[in-house]
Image (tube, coloured by chain):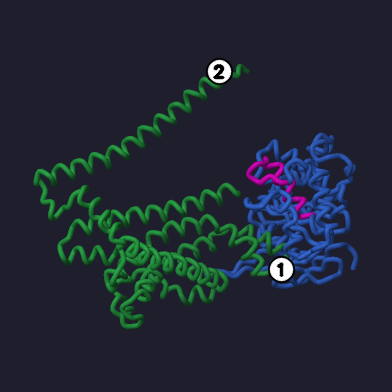
Amino acid sequence: MEKKDISENRLLYLKEKKQRKFIVLSFQIGILVTFLILWETLARFNIIDPFLMSMPSKIISTIKDLLLSGELFKHISTTLYETLLGFIIATLLGTIIAVLLWWSEYLRNILEPYIVVLNSLPKIALGPIIIVWFGAGTKSIVFMAIIITIIVTIITMENGFLGVDKNKIKLLKTFGATKLQTLTKLILPASLETFVSCLKINVGMSWIGSIMGEYLVSKQGIGYLIVYGGQVFKLDLVMASTVILCVLAGLMYFLVVLIEKSIKKRR
Amino acid sequence: MDGILNIKNVSLTYQSDTQETQAIKNLNLTVNKGEFISIIGPSGCGKTSILSLISGLIKPTNGEIFINGEKVIKPHKSIGYMLQRDELFPWRTIEKNAILPLEIKKVKENKYKAFVKNLLEKYGLKDFINSYPSEISGGMRQRVALIRTLASNPDLLLLDEPFSALDYQTRLSVCDDVYKIITEERKTAILVTHDISEALSMSDRVIVLTKRPATILNEHIYNYDKKILPLKRREDKNFGKEFEILWSELNDGKKGY
């Protein structure tokens, strides 16, 4: 075997792969840049109404103003706190409930219709009830984030637990394993991937919850900025807040992907 | 009561929403220490159920099962059960997989761990102790599965078509490996299979079952030299004849009795 021949083919393969990656990336950036330039130009020449549509330069200056006045940090930290708290509590509590449902078939059968209904119910409908119960503050917002995230967590994790290979459970039984041992030695480690994809879903869910919560009741936060901006027709502020939201949600998702990569590496 | 395993008048009936199915009817069997026996029968005749019964995973509807004179009511410590697939846990290394039964049984003594490690080394897995299951071949995985079965030093091994998930070539060589390990470690084994030549090449005794509800149709005792490995045994001059006897019996069994 000539090593040179193989490496030539290999080089070609790697080159093509690199090219492909480059093309994808340039289109991704190209679309964004074109979109921003088009937006900016159309707004400058009043082809689209800058008052209704805002424009990239104004969005940037709005963010800068928010940053300089110290407002930005306050709003971001408020929303981030609510989102993360909702995310963590819902993920942990949801997983624990899923474990209980896996544990007891009776419990699973009994609670099934309730979970189905709760899953279908638009959680925003509970808004007024939540405000009455938890007051017009952070508690209500966090609760909203939890209730939106937890149902999905329960369903995803329960399906993951129940989907673990029956033969592996049989194997543990032949060793005389207890239910707790089956859980810790098999079900939980086998569901790690499900858990990571659940985390990914939950990033989106907890943001929906916290922003929706802020729409209902809030004095500060990104969701508050969006609602406030809409009410006083400051579309620059609305757009700026949305951009900030995109960045934050993207970062949080990226963080989960990092966690996923470190887990995959260890396996 | 002699023998390592005594099955006395065992019947098994399955219940499902739509019907009641009798899987096993009046099964009687005694297995002696050091014996290698195979159970063959038409597919779906309840072969796996027999192993589940012996291992205490399910309870017989009627009758009793004794291991070393002790009645089986739950998974018994002197039994090692090897399933169709290796069922190695992908997140555990080969060694961690092999000592899993010790972990479950909370065996703390290091001598058992050393025993497992020794087995891994003895049977060609020395360099893969810290590898993960996805990094080794199907044949090696099956060997790890057998060593895992041997980890808690059981007296009786139950093998449920342990080679069926392997390709033909691997199957023949793993068959030799497994046979060698089992005879060298002086274990008693019950192999369930639908492969006649596999049963014939490994066993001292072959039990032929009828179709469902399964009961014993016939049994054959062979006097092959235990030192001859299965692959070699297939070359024996009587092998073809014995095969045909079992083959026609199995077909009769399918037709009913």
Q: Nearer the viewer, residue B154 or B116?
A: B116
Q: Nearer the viewer, residue A133 or B52?
A: A133
Residue B141, compared with residue A214, is above or below; it is above
Q: Which class describes the residues within 10 Å of circle 2: few (<14), some (14-19), or many (20+)? A: few
Q: Which residues are magenta?
A: B130-150
Q: Nearer the viewer, residue A140 or A37?
A: A37
Q: Amino acid at mark 2?
A: Asp
> Residue B92, position in %: x, y?
66, 52
Camera sees residue B36:
yes
What color was chain B assigned in the picture? blue
Residue A42, compared with residue B213, is above or below; it is above
Residue B211, compared with residue A47, is above or below; it is below
Q: Secondary structure at mark 1?
A: strand
- Distance from disc 1 to disc 2, alpha carbons, whole Å, reads 67 Å
Identify the chain of the residue marked 2, using the numbered disc in the image. Answer: A
Q: Which residue is mark 1?
A: B11
Q: Is residue B139 inside the magenta stretch?
A: yes
> Residue B69, position in %: x, y?
86, 69
Magenta segment main secondary structure = helix
Q: Which residue is mark 2?
A: A5
What color was chain A assigned in the picture? green
